[in-house]
Amino acid sequence: MPADLRDRLVALGGDPAARPLLVALDFDGTLAPLQDDPAASRILPAGVEVLAALAARDGVELALVSGRAMADLHALAQVPAGTYLVGSHGAERARVTQFGLDRDVVELTHAQADLLASLGARAAAVARGRDGVWVETKPTAVVVHTRLAEPDDAAPAEAEALALGTELGVGTLHGKDVVELTVLAADKGTALQALRHELGAPVVLYAGDDVTDEHAFAALDEQDVTLKVGPGQTVARYRVADPEAGVAALALLHDALG
């Protein structure tokens, strides 16, 4: 672990003025190693343990902030009651309870619903005939996935999906092997700031691995802790190599809390 990150986590854990501390984390590639089959993603066992331990601390709020649809995120994320779940890059939000999810209702106008249906049909045409390219429909968006495709199929599929977003004038998020086209404007940075203000959190720790996590890194302030997991250009202040190292950083923070 980089020495500057270790020092910052130790200082953060011992700072009572940083309470409530919001610990917000991406899911895939951050807590769960990336998988070719998204349904196979699971939080590392050590990650399940440290999230439960952090959630049990007074003055700590826990959140997962993901591009996944809420139902999918809840089904895969092994998180304790009280955890906030932010799905679809901020378009969906809920809180885990002992009895299931306490969800914020997402409502689309008739025009947005019609546009979403059109996006689904057009995106299906992008994927048609290309091995390994598939389409996911969310409550507010359509996603073209290319992780399982060869480069000769993936590159043109992503290019066509991006062009479709421009043509229809919808929100476009280009991440690792995905292009998401959304009828409801949302990004992780806006969602994270809204949650921090609601909770009154003076400090946020956010960790993520994808291009879409850069919105969250950029939205945070100098006193916050931004942690890039894995390679790639980033505006995050700190970096670790992989999800295992990210979980180790969370464990260090937990220990520093005393």
Image (spheres, rainbow, N blue to C red):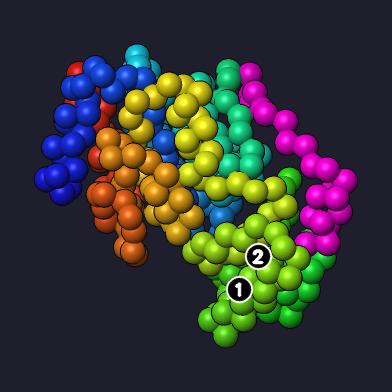
Which residue is at the front of the view, 129 or 24?
24
Tell which of 195 and 86 is nearer to you. 195
> Residue 15 location, x and y as percent?
21, 22
Is 107 drawn above or below residue 157 in the view shown? Answer: above
The Cα atoms of the two marked residues, 1 and 2, are separated by 7 Å
Q: Examine the image and state in which quarter residue 49 appears.
A: top left
State which quarter of the image contains the C terminus: top left
Q: Which picture quadrant has residue 5?
A: top left
Q: Residue at x 63, y 19 (%)?
A: 99
For the magenta stretch, what is the residue range?
A: 99-119
User: Is 254 located above or below residue 76 in the figure?
Assistant: above
Per the rendering, the mark at residue 144 is 2
Disc 2 residue crowd, few under 14, some 14–19, many 20+, Cα 10 Å: many
Residue 16 forms part of the magenta stretch: no
Can residue 44 be seen here? The reply is no
Residue 158 badge: 1
Residue sitting at x 58%, y 42%: 90
Count of numbered badges drawn on the protein: 2
Give the side of residue 253 with respect to residue 25, left or right: left
